[in-house]
């Protein structure tokens, strides 16, 4: 089992080397913009192992029929041969005209499996079993002329930043498994991989002492977030002046003032190396989102925030990924 | 990948159909064993799929037992028949261990081979059609194996299978032109590569030994023996349709056999033709025997055949396949010349058999003296007056002819011919028995005469001094219809339902189709191959010309096929884009054309100003389009259809309205 896995890894390495050194031989194309349409110039056909076995059986059949000088048997052999041979064209048509329309991937953290969805356009033709391989990941799609078949694949990630997807192999052995038609797709599309957050840290950095912005806000009622009184609210939180103005009881929302914003500063961690700093910052961003604390991310050349929410987190993690 | 239930069911069905092409010639035990194993395996896979493949303790004895059983039956594993039993057994065992897709593929590959073997046994049209259906199923099964397991719903016999069958029928039909081209031009072997084909597709027909009672199975066999086409287009009258196969001279009390002298060449001066020869072509079904059945007396032997002294035709090799012969015969002739040895042969009777018949012969001899014709007439009168014709005669004892002549007095041609010869020989008249066929059915549509196995017949030839050998048919004396109307009329009341008149007419029509199949496919050979290019002015093509024609034909076909494969489908975009494009065209006609750079939002902005009266309808349409096209989530099919319908329904309102 282990030896098999090692052998497979070795083979992948050899393939990768071949792709780098012999692009023509491995049919490696330069990355292309979407959509990528398959046409006859990039569809290759070879018999499968089963096709070869079937072919040798046909040869034996032909020899038998000729030897016994039996025309019906010869006719049968010819019919099977012609049908098998023409299945190349059916397989080719199954692939021809297909185009890769979109590559969709939700960013993941480095080291996780990246969920990639490939959206194909069948170009008005029913598509039978098509196998999609990307590296070691594999998926099968079929679809009617009107559908948009999606292939869901999981690709392992290693590093943060933009990742180039492994090239995609689309192949089909339709209709009888005798021939394999295949093509390579190498979309330009890159997918974002967030840095892996540090695992051990569970606390945000301490509040900055000097800038006590929270208390400043609390002074004026207009700045504080007010909401309607609920039965369980403590009396000291009632904003009496505001309540008087609005003719109903209003309370200051206790959340905001008690959690003043944090500053997640790249320069505050001189003791760590770059990757460790990025990992720590990524963890802080996630913690801050978890605890609903507004935060500012300070990076060497830019500052993001203060803000809170998924869009802000996305921006922060992207900047960290690309640092 | 493991086979799912649907795939396994289809595989089983395919294998059953493939096996059924062999049922006719397999030994009973093989049929039973195959049926039991396939059925058992199917039940197990359907109801106890968890058990998996056939376990080793069951598979191993079966695998080892198979060749043993074959050797026990045939004495060898070599040869066509034992080989095919072996192959069928292997296919059944393969089904037993088929759990994965690759097993199923191996089984189906092997099934192709078994189908070919089935055609070696039976070349007929029905057999070929049977095999054709099985081949379609093999391809259907291969196709089913390509569909990933998760995709399939529903039972085996459903719309999906119907769709698959349609696709297979289309693709096999599309392969037919290429098939025919390859079939027509593939060079045939002059010599077999291995083993001479034996016992293939043979009906024994008339054999070398005639024993009264032997024809019984033959008389109810309606399969064709041979077909004849006449140069004049018209057959001779029924009374003259005697197809002479073998002349039997030696009688041992039970059997009539040939004498060795029959293989001598005839002395030309002995044969005198009294009518113009009749030219005809005989298409023989394979008999695995070496003789032909010419009409009466052939004027010459066809190639690779010898004309014997008794004017029968013997070949150098058995007729192993459907074969066609050009012959010419005289219906009226005088065959003289009887040397002492031949005379002695034609008079010999075994000692100690049939004393009563011999006594009767001797009595006639005394009564009529040397007059052979009167003796023969006396025998004919005896038969006519006292004997009856039946296909189910009572059994005979040791002195068979005595029993027949004096006790049972009922039988058919073999009995009459045998008894007639015994009586005449006892009376000192040289007489011999001829076996062959008599009659035949004239097929007016196909203009050929069909002679069936049931037309098998035996009659006599009597030496009448000056007139030479003269044909005499005692059966005709008993039942004249046998000769004038054919064997079917003779059996009269004994006709069973399946030989009734209307059914026979239908079967004669069917025979015409069979004849066509025989002519076009089964008999195709090198000679006809060379005539393929006659249309193009090449009377006898050589291999180079044939190869060239083949190359041209294949190129044309493949060019057409490639055109089909490469022809781009109309780029129909998808449903949403099509609907949107149509919507834009309609708006353009209303006077607001979408600029090439304009996205839907900007276009809508302009439309609001230009067509305010339609804005209320356009707003939701464009909102839908933007959502369907640009939202993070892909549109599902139902939503797309709703949008397309709404877009189709939209009509811009005129300013006035």
Image (cartoon, grey):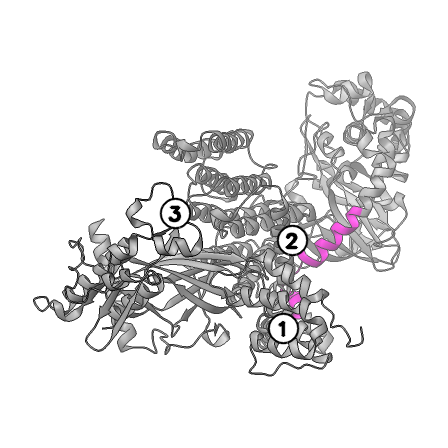
Residues at marks 2 and 1, CA–CA distance in whole angstroms: 22 Å
Disc ID at residue A184: none
Quarter-of-image position of residue A113: bottom left
Output the chain of dot 1.
Answer: B
Mark 1, other Cα within 10 Å: few <14 / some 14–19 / many ≥20: few
The extreme left residue here reads A271
- Left or right: residue B338 versus residue A166 is right
Residues at marks 1 and 3, CA–CA distance in whole angstroms: 82 Å
Residue B404 in magenta stretch: no
Disc ID at residue A229: 3
Q: Secondary structure at mark 2?
A: helix
The extreme top residue here reads B407
Instruction: Name the residue tied to disc 1.
Output: B560
Q: Position of residue B547 (x, y in %)?
A: 58, 74
A141 or B94: nearer the viewer: A141
Residue B522 in magenta stretch: yes
Looking at the rendering, the stretch of residues picked out in magenta corresponds to: B510-530
Q: Position of residue B488 (x, y in %)?
A: 84, 35
Q: Secondary structure at mark 1?
A: helix
User: For the residues tagged 2 and 1, is the chain the same?
Assistant: yes
Q: Secondary structure at mark 3?
A: loop
Sequence order check: which comes first, mark 2 or mark 1? 2
**Closer to us: mark 3 or mark 2?**
3
Residue at x 25%, y 73% (from the top left corner): A303
Residues at marks 3 and 2, CA–CA distance in whole angstroms: 73 Å
Instruction: Name the residue tied to disc 2.
Output: B166
Residue at x 55%, y 68% (from the top left corner): B626
Output the chain of dot 3.
Answer: A
B633 or A240: nearer the viewer: A240
């Amino acid at each position: 089992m282990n030896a098999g896995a090692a052998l497979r890894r070795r083979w992948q390495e050899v393939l990768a080397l071949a792709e780098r050194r012999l692009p023509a031989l491995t049919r490696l194309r330069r990355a292309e913009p979407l959509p990528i349409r398959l046409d006859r110039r990039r569809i290759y056909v070879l018999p499968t192992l089963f096709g070869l076995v079937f072919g040798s059986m046909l040869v034996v059949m032909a020899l038998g029929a000729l030897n016994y000088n039996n025309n019906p048997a010869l006719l049968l052999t010819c019919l099977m041969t012609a049908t098998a041979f023409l299945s190349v064209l059916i397989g080719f048509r199954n692939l021809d005209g297909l185009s890769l329309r979109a590559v969709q991937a939700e960013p993941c953290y480095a080291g996780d499996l990246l969920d990639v969805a490939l959206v194909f356009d069948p170009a008005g033709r029913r598509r039978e079993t098509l196998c999609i391989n990307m590296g070691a990941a594999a998926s099968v799609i079929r679809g009617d002329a009107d559908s948009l078949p999606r292939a869901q694949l999981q690709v392992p990630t290693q590093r943060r930043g933009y990742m180039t997807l492994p090239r995609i192999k689309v192949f089909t052995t339709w209709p009888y498994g005798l021939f394999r038609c295949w093509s390579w797709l190498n979309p330009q599309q890159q997918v974002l991989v967030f840095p892996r957050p540090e695992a051990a840290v569970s606390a945000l950095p301490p509040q900055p002492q000097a800038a006590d912005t929270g208390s400043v806000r609390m002074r004026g009622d207009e700045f504080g977030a007010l909401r309607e009184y609920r039965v369980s609210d403590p009396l000291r939180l009632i904003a009496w002046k505001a309540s008087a103005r609005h003719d109903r009881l209003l309370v200051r929302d206790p959340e905001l003032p008690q959690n003043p914003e944090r500053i997640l500063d790249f320069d505050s961690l001189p003791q760590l190396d770059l990757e460790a700093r990025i990992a720590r910052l990524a963890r802080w961003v996630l913690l801050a989102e978890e605890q609903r604390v507004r935060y500012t991310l300070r990076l060497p050349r830019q500052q993001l925030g203060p803000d809170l929410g998924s869009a802000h987190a996305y921006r922060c993690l992207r900047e960290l990924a690309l640092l | 990948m493991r086979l799912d239930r649907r795939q396994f069911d289809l595989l089983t069905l395919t294998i059953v159909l493939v096996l059924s092409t062999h049922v006719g010639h397999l030994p009973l035990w093989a049929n039973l064993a195959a049926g039991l194993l396939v059925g058992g395996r199917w039940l197990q896979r359907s109801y106890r799929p968890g058990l998996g493949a056939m376990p080793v303790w069951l598979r191993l004895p079966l695998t080892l037992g198979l060749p043993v059983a074959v050797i026990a039956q045939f004495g060898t594993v070599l040869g066509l028949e034992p080989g095919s039993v072996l192959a069928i057994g292997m296919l059944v065992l393969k089904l037993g261990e088929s759990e994965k897709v690759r097993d199923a593929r191996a089984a189906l590959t092997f099934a192709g081979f078994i189908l070919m073997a089935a055609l070696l046994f039976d070349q007929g049209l029905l057999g070929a059609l049977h095999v054709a259906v099985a081949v379609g199923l093999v391809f259907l099964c291969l196709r089913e194996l390509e569909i990933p397991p998760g995709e399939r719903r529903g039972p085996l016999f459903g719309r999906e299978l119907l769709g698959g069958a349609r696709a297979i029928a289309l693709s096999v039909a599309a392969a037919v032109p290429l098939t025919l081209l390859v079939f027509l031009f593939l060079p045939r072997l002059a010599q077999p590569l291995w083993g001479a084909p034996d016992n293939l597709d043979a009906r024994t027909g008339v054999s070398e030994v005639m024993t009264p009672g032997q024809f019984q199975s033959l008389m109810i066999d309606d399969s064709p023996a041979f077909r004849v086409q006449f140069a004049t287009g018209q057959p001779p009258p029924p009374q003259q349709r005697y197809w002479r196969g073998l002349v039997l001279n030696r009688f041992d009390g039970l059997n009539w056999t040939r004498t060795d002298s029959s293989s001598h060449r005839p002395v030309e001066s002995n044969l005198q033709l009294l009518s113009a020869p009749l030219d005809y072509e005989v298409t023989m079904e394979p008999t695995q025997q070496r003789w032909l059945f010419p009409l009466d007396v052939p004027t010459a032997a066809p190639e690779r055949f010898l004309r014997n002294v008794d004017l029968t035709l013997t070949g150098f090799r058995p007729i192993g396949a459907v074969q066609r012969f050009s012959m010419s015969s005289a219906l009226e002739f005088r065959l003289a010349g009887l040397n002492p040895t031949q005379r002695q042969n034609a008079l010999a009777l075994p000692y100690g058999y049939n004393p009563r018949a011999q006594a009767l012969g001797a009595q006639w001899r005394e009564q009529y003296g040397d007059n052979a014709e009167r003796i023969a007439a006396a025998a004919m009168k005896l038969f006519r007056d006292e004997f009856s014709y039946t296909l189910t005669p009572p059994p005979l004892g040791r002195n068979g002819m005595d029993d027949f002549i004096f006790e049972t007095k009922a039988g058919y041609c073999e009995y009459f011919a045998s008894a007639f010869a015994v009586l005449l020989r006892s009376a000192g008249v040289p007489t011999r028995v001829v076996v062959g066929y008599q009659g035949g059915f004239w097929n007016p549509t196909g203009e050929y005469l069909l002679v069936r196995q049931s037309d098998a017949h035996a009659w006599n030839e009597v030496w009448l001094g000056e007139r030479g050998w003269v044909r005499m048919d005692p059966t005709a004396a008993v039942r004249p219809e046998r000769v004038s109307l054919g064997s079917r009329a003779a059996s009269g009341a004994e006709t069973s339902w399946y030989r009734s008149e209307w059914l026979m007419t239908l079967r004669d029509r069917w025979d015409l189709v069979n004849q066509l199949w025989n002519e076009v496919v089964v008999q195709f050979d090198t000679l006809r191959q060379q005539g393929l290019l006659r249309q193009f002015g090449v009377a006898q093509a050589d291999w180079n010309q044939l190869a060239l024609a083949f190359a041209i034909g294949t190129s044309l076909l493949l060019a057409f096929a490639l055109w089909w494969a490469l022809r781009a489908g109309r780029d129909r975009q998808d449903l949403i884009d099509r609907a949107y494009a149509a919507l834009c065209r309609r708006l353009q006609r209303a006077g607001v054309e979408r600029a090439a750079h304009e996205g839907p939002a900007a276009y809508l902005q302009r439309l609001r100003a230009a067509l305010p009266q339609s804005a209320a309808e356009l707003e939701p349409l464009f909102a839908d389009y933007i959502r369907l096209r640009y939202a993070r989530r892909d549109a599902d099919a139902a939503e797309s259809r709703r949008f397309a319908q709404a877009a189709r329904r939209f009509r811009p309102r005129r300013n006035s309205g």
